[in-house]
Each structure stands twice: as C-alpha cells, then as structure tokens.
Image (cartoon, coloured by chain):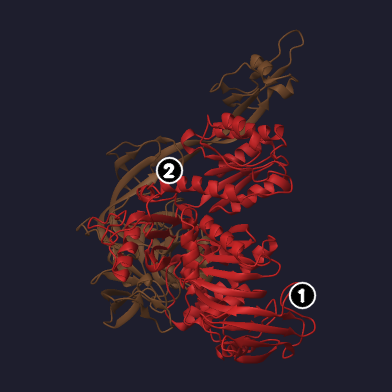
Amino acid sequence: MNPANQEALSVLAIDIGTINTHALLFEIVDESYFLIGAGTTPTTTNLPVKDVLPGVIGAIHQLQELTGRILLNPKDDLIIPSQVDGVGIDRLYITFSIGKKLKLVTFGLMDDVSVQSVKKLAATVPGETVESISLNDPRTIHQQIDDVIRSRPDLILFAGGTDRGSTRAVKKMADLLVAILQVIPKPQRPPVVFCGNQSLVKPIKNMLEAYTQFESTSNIRPEMDNEELDQASEDVARVITTIQASEVEGFQKLIRLCNDSPCPTTIAIGRITRFLSKVGDPEKGVLSIDLGASATITASAVAGKLDLNILPVGSGEGLAEFLRVMPFSEITRWFPAEIDLEEARDQIWQKTLFPASIPMTLEALTIEQAVYRQMLHYIMYELSTRGVLAPNGYETILCSGMALTQGSNPNQLLMMLLDGLQPRGISTLILDSHSILSTLGAISRTLPLLPVQVLESSAFANLATVVSPVSSLRAGAVVLRGSLEYSNQKIRTFEVKQGGFTVLPLRAGDTATLELVLSHNVQVESTELAETRFKVNGSVCGVVIDARGRPIRLPKKPEIRAELFSRWNGMLAQK
Amino acid sequence: MFTTFTQITPAIHLRRTRVLPVSGTVMVRQGQKVKSEDIIAEAVIPTHHELVDVVRILGLSNSKAADALIQRRVGETLGEGDILAETGGIFSRVIRTPGPGKVISIHDGQILIQTGAQTLSIQARYSGIIIEIIPDRGAVIETSGALIQGAWGNGKFAVGPLLCKAETKTSIISPSDLEITARGSIIASAVCIDEKIFEEAASLPVAGLIFGVIPSALREAAIAQPYPILLTDGFGRTGMNFAALKYLSQYNNHELTLNAGIEEDSLSQKPEVIIDASVDEQAPAISSRVTSGQMVRIHTTPFLGQVGTVEKILPGLTTLPNGLRVSAASVIMVNRERKTIPVNNLDVIGFAQFS
C-alpha cells in the first residue's frame, strides 16, 4: 500500500460494485474538498473479462473525459502522486462489494449471549451464515463436526466468554474446532477470527494456528450486558478483503496502490452512518439504505451506536431471493390498474437475469418501482423485527443505489421512497445519486476532513423534509395546523387532513421555521413532540407532510387504488 | 463502454474447464480423448465422524494418562470392533471403535475417527481432448461445435439429437410437435406458453427442451422437470432471438450438448448449448465493449429478443421517454428501424475464448 503521508490535494476513490464500478475524484477547491466528478462503467469481474482492472480503468477514463483531468499515463497506469501541472492523484481508496458470497460458520457459548452477538457480527459481513454451533447445540458432537464440514465454510467466527469469564467452555469449543479443522483438507481450511474472552487469545491461538490462519479481534461481548461489534466488524472486514483479493483477478494490483486497506462497502457505510449520527440530534439517528444488486446494506445509528445489517434482497441477484419470500400480490398492490400482471411478472423475472437492465418505458419503470416499494417495506419490517429501528424515527435517511436514486422526476422518486420506507417522525430524505456514501466511509479512517467537507457540499441531493403525523382519525379530518416562516419573513399557513399530502415549497439552500399544532390524538413521534417549532432546510421537493398514516393502507379494488394513487401524485405535485 | 456479453457462434473450437470443488484425483491425462460420460476427477469426501473421548469414558484424570492407553495412530485404518484404548490388568476396560473407519487425529485424549465417506466424481460432459490438467482438481477439455449461450436454465444436463421445431422466431410449440419420433431428442422452439408441454415432454420422454422464452409463470414447473430446459432469451412471450434460431435451424438433427445448469462458484457462467458440427471457421475473439458495427441482442422489453447492429454510441446521457437519463446506443434493428436503446440493455453477440 502507498504511504499516507503524501499531502492529499486530489483523492481518487473507486467503488467496485457487483454491477457498476464508480470512479470519484475529490479535490481541494478554496481550502475545502469537493466532489469534482464521477465516472461509471459496468464491473468487469465476470466473464468474459474476469478481471476487475478493465472496469476500473474504464471508469477512470470516463472520469477523465468528464473532468478534463489526466489521471492515467498512456499505459493506463495511475499517476501517483500528482505532478506540478496537476496531472495525477495523491491518494487512492477502494470500496468493494464484489467477490463470491462467503459462507460463514459461527461458534459461541450461550444462545442469548455470545451466540446472539456473533450472529449479529456475521450479519455485518457480506456472506451467509451456513452453520452455527453453541454449547446448547442439541446435535451430537460428531453431527456438529459433519455438519460444519459439509457446509464448506470460507470463514469461522469464534466468540465466547466475557473478559473475566468462562475459560473452560471456550477451550472446549476450541477443541471441537481443532477436530473440525483436522478433517478439512489443508488448502480448504477456513481462517478463524476469535472475538471472545481476551485472556484466552494466546492459548486459543496456540491451539488453532497450527491448523489454519488465526486472527483475533476485540471481545464482542466483553461483559454480559455489553455488546461491542464495531472493532470486530472492522477486523473481520480486513480478513474478508484478503479472501476476496485472492479470488478476484486484478484486485491485488489495486491494493498495492491504495492508501488504506480496501474496505467492504458494508463497513464503509457503517462508518459514515455512525459518524453522521454523532454530529446530529443525539435523540434521533441516521438511517442509510444502500440497495445494491445482490444485497441491501442498512446502517442505523443513534448517537454513535451503530446497527449494521446486510439483507439478501436487491435489484439484481437479490431480486430472485426477494421474489422467493414475497408473494407477488404484495408487489402488484402498488401497480396502477392498467398494468398486465403476467407481463409485469415476466419483466420482473427478466430483471433477475439481467440485473443492470434499465426500464425503457414509463410502464416498465412503474413496475420496477413497485418492486422497490415493496422491497423497502420488507427491509423496514425486517429491521423492525430485529429491533434495529430508532423509536422516534430518523433525522436523516440516506438512500443509495441506482434503484433508489433514479426516477423520472423527483416527485415520483419521493413517492416511491415514502411508500416503501413509510418514515416516522420528521426526516430529511437524502439521495446519494453519485454513489459516494461508502467512499466517504472508506476515506474517513485516514482522511477525516474529506467526508466532513464533502457532506457540507452539494454532493448529496436533499430530496425532501418529510413530516409524518400518525393518528386514528378518519380520512379528511384535520390532523394538524401549522405555518412555515421563510427567511424573508413571509409566512405560509396550512392545514393538513388525514389521508393525503401537503407540500410546502422550500428551495434547496434555503431555510425556514416550521411550526406544527397537532390535533388531539395525533402524534408525529412516538413520544410527545419536544418542540413545536423546527428549523427546516430546503430541498428539491420542499417540506412534505405525509398524512396517509402508518402503515399506509391500500384499497383492495384495483380501480379504487388507481384513483387513490392518482390523487396522491396530484397532491405531491401541487405546490 | 463495457456491457454484458452473449456467445452465439458458428462451429468453433471451445474450451471447458471441469474441476472438483475440493482436492481429489485427476483420472485423465493430457491429450486423452474423452466422451461426455467419462470421469475427469474423483474425490473422497468424508461425511461421518465420531469423536471418542478416552479421558471421559475411562474416567481418567488427564489427557496424558489417556495417551498412554490409546493403541492407535493417526492415519490407521480401523476394522469393526477394533480396540482404540485399553487400561490393561485383570479387569481391563476397553474402548472399541464405533465402526470401521480411519483415525484422523488424536488430540487431548480424544480420538477423531472418520467413519463414513462418499466419492464425488466430475464427468467430462463435453466430448473432446484433454488439453490441460489442473493438478488435484480436474482438466480443461477442448471440444468443438456451434455455441448458443442461454439466459436461463433449470439446472439439468443432457446430450441428444437436436429437433428444431421453430419455423419462425415466434413459433409456439404445440402438443403435435411432441410426436413419438421426438423421443430422446432435444426439442427446440421459439415460445412455450403451456405447462402441459412440459408434462407431455416428460412422459415421451424427451432429452431436453430449448425455447427462446417462456412466461415466468411456468418457471417453477420448468425447474421441476427431470430433463434440462434452456431459455435463450428469458421470460416473456416475444420469441427467440434471430441469431440463436439461425444456428438451431441450420444444425437440425445434429448431436447437441445441453447444459442448463451453472456450476457453483463460476461467476456469470451462463447455461449453454453446444451443437456438434465440424469447425469451418474460427470466429474472431471480440471485446465486450460496445462499439459501432457490433451485432447486439436486446434483453429487455419492449424489444426483448430482438437483434440489431450498433450504429453508434450516443454521446453523454440520453433521456428516455420515461425520464431516466442513461448511456444509450443507436441500434439498427433487423427491419432497418433505428432505435435508441440503453447500453445496459444490450448483449454483444460474439465469441471470446475462455475456459
């Protein structure tokens, strides 16, 4: 890797996704970092190219064309560091979500303590937990051995014991692990990451390292009632990078040029979300959703406490998994009446075969966005059942991934996000249209100033500030009255009725004061509103009050539903 | 700009890699001729193990005491009832093996015995010549034939004679196409819209089916069939792409290898048809970059399955009728109409040699 002591006047970040590779250039302009440009090409890890480099070079070429900057020499080698004439870059960072889907096996002691924590750790890793072993496992020892071997793990996560707790049980588990490793042929033995009792790191290492690569990280359960996943997540990410780098052609060459270890997209998004939650309202958090082709990364953080999850649903490979768990009727309820259901079903399944394909007609886009509405709904439900969602909603919801940031117009995109996310409280919806969210997370470790300054710039699109009152009032009843006082002292008063939208224009860059007076039995947050006056920032769609209730209930009859959709669209377009 | 790539070619030389997922023994040698059913490599995969805790069973104080009593060594083969450990003396206590097997390890007073294993073998699947041995894993086979990559397959595999029933790119297969003479054949048609065809094909039985498209509602039924089903273009009702139909018609009655499965861990490998035919030309290897003059297949509605030629890549981003702004190309369709298509919706048709 390149040394990090080079002054970072220009920074190139490469985000290698399953479908697309993005090249992003950041530079210092007037003493602050700004996003200068972004280039995107399809990722080339698949056949027939089967090498990550042509896609990376293609994205940099596109970036060169768009910005007029020269970053590559005639042999397509990156010019590092930058030259006096401005050619080249000073630092390179990489985030990635490519590589095979890793098979993980977890080892822990007690089901409701270390086993629970190690499963949560595994959920932050791009892979699938194929086996889980605990002290309470009802299977016989030899069944456990056979089942782990049959699962052919790529990585074993081994937790157990608080820092002054159990040693005997952990060693017993290590004995089992030794037996398993001995049976697996040497070249196929998976690395083991130990994240348990820190006083046992040395003896466990002595037991295991004769058989396989052994890594240790901080205890994910240092005390019975204290769970610490952050450091372990970062360390596991490094092990994963090593595994994937050996599998993906061309990756090693890139790593040599990087200023920090390439960072899995999941970890990078977790880092930046945690950072944002520390600088915002400590009572309310930040939710990041990156809907990728094979999986969706969600990061929920409140006052620096992060919950990172990877859900196996997405816009491409993950779409087939979504269709497996979701009845088709749950998707079609978001269709306007005139769509042919069989044609729609064909289009959706076709998307699973060609994940990068783009809907060409308005109808095709409507069908695809109906899928994403229901997918977001499913994701929020999953997070809710995992106890991850902040009770008072989120101050900021960041949406990343082409599926969530591309629409025919901002209102239509906002409607999709509101239908799917159904946010609670008062939230600002922000679009990561340039796919820079994970990149900022990767850079933040060694160049923390860059994400701070880029976040303050216009690199993200502020789509809308959304207020979501919840009540049991009948449709048409007044749920709240309020006013919006603009910076020029002009005041706009309004009345919001149950069942629809109220849109208050407020241009991006402007601020205003929003005052809300709620009707009886109406809530905006799960507790009483601490204040009735809020400072709100302008956005593309302005301040939107979504009084459709939570959850949004749709009529069963398609024609009535279509009429309702049309009415909602009309309300959202009205300013 | 890169895009996805579909191989549809006349008869050419092809290489296919056949490897075990784990280390094993390679059963072929370089230069050897192989048939599709020949075994390329085999591996013995342990499936059952027993962990015998000598310390606990004999009530010993520590593992050192156990080590002194264990009468077996690592790697030793055990027969039914063989003694593993014995205390000795007049009232000797004995531990016998739970079954025939092999001692894998002796650690901390515990003996790990492999009591069951299964043999995993990899067949050649393609007739041809072994041109490379991959030590402990398998081999690369060079075969020849016309290649048609598919968009979807039901995971099965077969070899059989091709019976092309598609007269046009929109021909719908009917029960009359499944007459008794079709038994054992791989039948190709453009569209299948009736699940009953699958059942009739199974009862005939056929060796396999190839279609351009089927409605996605038939997907589960297609997966459930015991024979391979491959779709050249995917899910819908539009028909088969012209390039695939051309070779299926041209090579009617030729022997065909239908691989409707995708090997584990082989990223983006597509299901494929290889039609046995003598090589009369070597198609030039092409890049998967989209450039002017390339033949492309469109894989998305409303032009699903249509073939055209790239006139030019449009500069910058193009706004589609639905408002999306994307990289696009101008494509001249077979009927000479000019269409603007997102680059992401194009598959370059051609050939690139990889194994």
- Direction from residue A281 to residue A185 in the image, left or right: left
Residue position for label 2: B122
Q: Quadrant of residue A358?
A: bottom left
Hue used for the chain lettered B? brown
Rendered residue at 55%/85% (across/down):
A506
Hue used for the chain lettered A? red
Rendering coords of residue B261 (x, y %): 44, 56
Q: Is residue A214 visible?
A: yes
As drawn, the residue found furthest toward the left would be B281
- Direction from residue A338 to residue A392 in the image, left or right: right
**What is the secondary structure assignment of the residue under circle 2?**
strand
Q: What kind of residue is marked 1?
A: Glu
Q: Could you tell me which chain the residue with mark 1 belongs to?
A: A
Rendering coords of residue A237 (x, y %): 52, 49
**Crowd rating for badge 2 (residues with CA inside 10 Å; few <14, some 14–19, many 20+):** many
State the quadrant of the N terminus of chain B: bottom left
As drawn, the residue found furthest toward the top would be B90
Q: CA distance from mark 1 to mark 2?
A: 66 Å
Foreground: A229 or A160?
A229
Above or below, A218 relative to B210:
above
Q: Could you tell me which chain the residue with mark 2 belongs to?
A: B
Q: What kind of residue is marked 2?
A: Ile
**Crowd rating for badge 1 (residues with CA inside 10 Å; few <14, some 14–19, many 20+):** few
Q: Is residue B194 visible?
A: no
Count of all numbered marks drawn on residues in the image: 2
Residue position for label 1: A528
